[in-house]
Image (cartoon, rainbow, N blue to C red):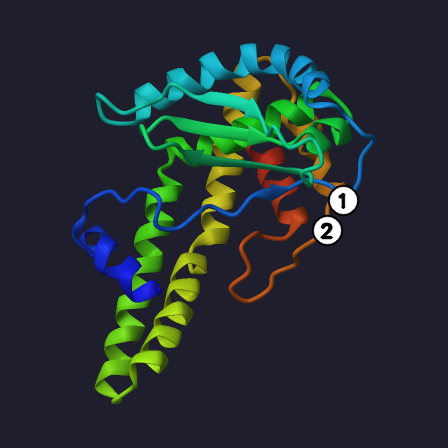
Amino acid sequence: MLRKIVQTCLVGIVGVMLVGCVAPAPETVSKSAPAYSVSRAEARLGPVQRRVEPVAERYCRASLPAGSNCDFNIRVDPKADALPNAYQTIDNAGRPQIVFTAALIAGARNDDELAFVMSHEAAHHIAGHLGRKQRDAVTGAVVVGVLATLAGASPDALDSAMDVGATVGSRAYSKEYEIEADRLGTVIAHRSGYDPVRGAEYFRRIPDPGNAFLGTHPPNALRIDVVRETAAGL
């Protein structure tokens, strides 16, 4: 139950980094794509990875405190039938992971798209978005939990209220985090020798989330504009 998560993660509110309390939302890139085996996906992703990862690591080391883990492990999900996604997370040893599914790689029209998605996910780690979303979720759960307690909520009602608070908290700044990752991802892709504007064309092929209240992603058109604006200044 969320009450136990909050008890474990409460220290995040006073500034301690949390790991593993709230998972990041995957970046869904397309609904369908030609079938790719995992090995074929790895072969296609490899050349892009070898160009982008060193650049992302340099930006990471220049941006984060000394001793931060910037050794990105970029890999393909071993489940060949996984839906088209890419996401950033951290393993139990603290190493940043960028995971692509074979379906996403199969659906990419060019290496610029793969490079932009990879750079965007690396930017999430560099900007500390996972830790920030964890703290947002815990803060939301605690605030709503306190209000529910003051209102005399039962234990079950308290758990439900804290679930709602965590959801609202984790999404409060989610769109801003995506825009931040798009901006830095544009820079990383460009410095890696790819065209981020061409890469961001994949936004035209995914469902547009619009500007939904408490949505996790901003409108696709806005993201494309952000990439174009950032690239124009490079």
Quarter of the image for the N terminus: give it.
bottom left
Determine the secondary structure under disc 1: loop
- Taking the spot 43% from the left edge, 21% from the top edge, the residue there is 72
On the image, which quarter does residue 51 sit in? top right
Q: Give the label, 1 or 2, closer to the camera.
A: 1
Side (left or right) of 205 relative to 161: right
Residue that badge 2 annotates? 207
Image coords of residue 71 (percent x, y) = 38, 18
Q: Relative to residue 15, is residue 115 depicted above or below?
A: above
Residue that badge 1 annotates? 31
Side (left or right) of 123 relative to 159: right
Kind of residue at disc 1: Lys
Determine the secondary structure under disc 2: loop
Is residue 197 something that shows in the picture? yes
Image coords of residue 130 (percent x, y) = 38, 43
On the image, which quarter does residue 39 sit in? top right
Q: Residues within 10 Å of mark 1 (few under 14, many from 20)?
A: some
Q: Nearer the viewer, residue 182 or 73?
A: 73
Q: CA distance from mark 1 to mark 2?
A: 8 Å
- Taking the spot 63% from the left edge, 17% from the top edge, the residue there is 194
Sequence-wise first label, 1 or 2: 1
Q: Relative to residue 60, is residue 11 depicted above or below?
A: below
Kind of residue at disc 2: Pro
Image coords of residue 181 (percent x, y) = 49, 37
Side (left or right) of 60 relative to 142: right
Do tag 1 and tag 2 residues touch (Cβ < 8 Å)?
yes
Q: Nearer the viewer, residue 213 or 4?
A: 4
Q: Residues within 10 Å of mark 2 (few under 14, many from 20)?
A: few
On the image, which quarter does residue 158 sit in? bottom left
